[in-house]
Amino acid sequence: MTRHIRHAAVFCGLLLVALLLNATRVQVLQAGSLTGNTANRRPDIARYAQPRGDILVGDRPVTGSKDSGEQLRYERTYTDGPLYAPVTGFSSQLYGTTLLEHTEDAVLSGADPLLAPLPLWTDFTRSRTRGGDVVTTLHPAAQRAAFKGLAGRKGAVAALEPSTGRILALVSAPSYDPEELSGNGPAEARSWKRLTTDPDKPMLNRAVRQTYPPGSTFKVVTTAAALDAGVVRDLDAPTRSPDRYTLPGTRTTLTNESRGCADASVRDAFTFSCNTVFAKLGVETGVAEMTATAHALGFNDGRLRIPFRVARSTFDTSVDRAQLALSSIGQYNTRATPLQMAMVAAAVANGGQLRQPYLVERTLRSSGVTLTTTGPLPVRQAMYPSTAARLRRLMRDVVERGTGTRAAIRGAIVGGKTGTAQHGLGNSGVPYAWFVSWAQARGELEPRVAVAVVVEDAEADRGEISGGGDAAPIARAVMRAVLTP
């Protein structure tokens, strides 16, 4: 009898060991594959079991969470969703996350190890810490001014603080309400289909993910390269430029929209946006110097994050002289995001120094205690300080007596550059209207804001300098919002 009890005990012990080994295999060795299995809803249930942390603009949350009463309990809500969509992106139970909701997901969802007061205990219990908050660099009034200025037209606005690189405004139009995608029901699926098939592409972040030919705004880069290289020494000297410029090695001629461009000085050519002068100037400066300046200002850099990815702005380095002439006036293969052109204006405003732009000021625990801070990122000398000073004077001339007078602000010093970028088959499309600028309050030592505006469906006739008519007033509203106490 004792022998049978002993055998039974040994058998039960073996069963217990087998159970422990199997539990170890399932919970440890297979944990990763089981967690990632599409049939396993536990991670999703845990993820949405508590409110998500918030994204803040001007210390005010522009996001929230609501209790749906469903298995995936909390859904994302957005205050002024279309206004801030190019910054927040969306957090959807069906379609995942984008933009700040994606790059800052660990903090917002509570998964960041820095949020846990006792990390080892949290790992052992697999509990989820309450989500933290993300404080942006946005200036609320500037963001609203940019959104209102576009008024539903296709386009984008980017504004920076030149001395730090803080992004003050980032707007894309048309926009959408991210809250329409927050849940996981049929309504969200219908919204997704509608938004992704809309020919106006409201979910495209035109400020950072769309590149455009920058047109005459690129003449700021060309002028900087020519001044740095010593090709131009006297801004008021005649340039020996014809009114109709034959592209080198071709029979194609380039003309001007403005009058009085023949033999114009660089100052007058910049003020009234003469294509022939700057096409010729780009050729004289050469590919190497033009490329060096473009690279220093951020072109051809695919690594820029703010913290989400920014599309690469391009300046073609393998061009012949005719192509270089067109590239130097922002055509051919030259393309830029609005953020990139705001960086160009910011470098001019900041004495030639370019600060890398950033969007997240700091992250906070749910208690309000600071978790991480960003601060100004490394600086790069994009052009000589003397070049930047001369460019600031040229840009002031554009606003005070040239094509950008509609950007002038009473009581402030404003510099700008208009641009009209041709596009489409045979340049048949309505030109993109550009304006890049900076503004400084009188009595202050340095400019406080740099702006780039692009309007895709400009209302000007093809023959007009539409950047001054369509884009400049939007830039003016944004700059004034930042300068107003």
Image: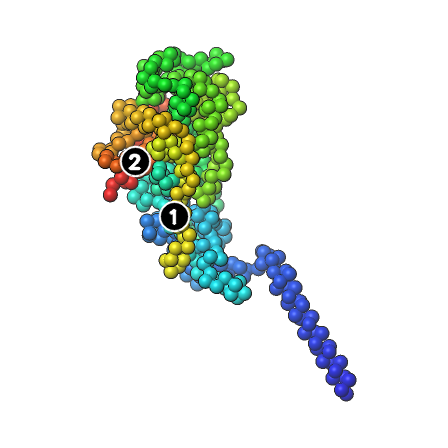
Q: CA distance from mark 2 to mark 1?
A: 21 Å
Q: Residues within 10 Å of mark 1 (few under 14, many from 20)?
A: some
Residue at point 35%, 34% (across, down): 350
Residue at which label 2 appears: 446
Numbered tag placed on residue 361 in the rendering: 1
Position of 205 compared to 236: left or right? right
In which quadrant of the rendered view does residue 169 lie?
top left
Above or below, 378 against 227 in this view is below
Q: Are marks 2 and 1 in contact (CB under 8 Å)?
A: no
Instruction: Decide if residue 175 is in sight here.
Output: no
In the rendered image, residue 70, in percent from the top left (x then y), is placed at: 46, 62
In which quadrant of the rendered view does residue 161 lie?
top left
Above or below, 231 against 453 in this view is above
Instruction: Decide if residue 377 is in sight here.
Output: yes
Above or below, 214 against 79 in this view is above
> Quadrant where the N terminus lies?
bottom right
Question: What kind of residue is marked 2?
Answer: Glu
In the rendered image, residue 338, in percent from the top left (x then y), is placed at: 40, 34
Question: What kind of residue is marked 1?
Answer: Glu
Please, which residue is most extreme toward the left here?
A: 411
Residues 456 and 324: in front is: 324
Sequence-wise, the earlier of marks 2 and 1 is: 1
